[in-house]
Image (tube, rainbow, N blue to C red):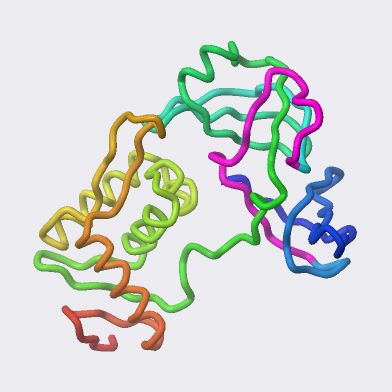
Amino acid sequence: MNAFRAVVHSVVPSESLAWLRVGRARLAARLACRKGERLSVEVRPEEVLLCAAHPGLVSARNVLPGRVRGLRHVPEGVYVDVLCAPPLVAMVTRGAVRDMKLARGRRVFAVVKASSVRVRATVDAPVLVSVVGRHGVLTPSLLSLLRAIRDLGSLTAAAEATGVTYRTAWLRVERANRAWGAPLVHRRRGGCGGGGAVLTAEGDGVVDLDKESRRRLGPSSVIRGRGAVPE
């Protein structure tokens, strides 16, 4: 996930547009904010487009020149680290890497729509809840990962959002499956979207239970079935 601390430099109400200052760089965003406000914003790698040449006149407000700093292959595709202002990571397909001849040092343009710049949400809620399954406990860190998988549709993106490696994320998924006693995550392979990860029906149920419980309960609660017993 591309995450930045930003200051609102100016607001253009007629265009529902705000210009954010990120270090020495600027980003256009469609956010409800006021001049001088400090924000934490993010851009998903899947929403960063790469062009081999300047795209010309486009509707996207952010067209950033840069160079490829590195590539990282994952099951869902390839993360391309672009040195631009601000620095960005894009998620592209292996075919795009091949067709664009992407390699370290390659000049590219990163294109980001203003609507893709969002206020950053906190992955872990301040209320800590554990859910008891048939064979163990789904801890707050496991539940946080499940929520991120449902929101992002990718285990790799969920791992980055929760601050763990891809391998650690899969180990946590396996631990959650064992604790619950049934698969909570389904891995999708291939396809035009390059695959990903989604929650099963039971996984959705666990996340919905977690969400409702965090809304109703105080800190540090354990959910047993459909009830709750505070620790």
Residue 139 lies in what quarter of the image? bottom left
Left or right: 2 in relation to 53: left
Number of labels in the image equals 0
Where residue 116 sits in the image (x, y, percent)?
64, 50
- Look at the image and tell me in which quarter the C terminus lies: bottom left
Q: Residue at x 70, y 31 (%)?
A: 110
Where residue 97 sits in the image (x, y, percent)?
53, 18
> Per the image, is 93 magenta?
no
Q: Residue at x 61, y 60 (%)?
A: 120
Residue 62, placed above or below residue 172: above
Residue 229 lies in what quarter of the image? bottom left
Residue 63, placed above or below residue 52: below
Residue 7, placed above or below residue 220: above
Where residue 71 sits in the image (x, y, percent)?
54, 23
Q: Residue at x 79, y 50 (%)?
A: 28
Residue 39 lies in what quarter of the image? bottom right
Nearest the eye: 30 or 185: 30
**Magenta extent:** 38-60
Where residue 19 sits in the image (x, y, percent)?
84, 54
Q: Residue at x 61, y 30 (%)?
A: 81
Left or right: 121 in relation to 140: right
Nearest the eye: 39 or 197: 197
> Per the image, is 43 magenta?
yes
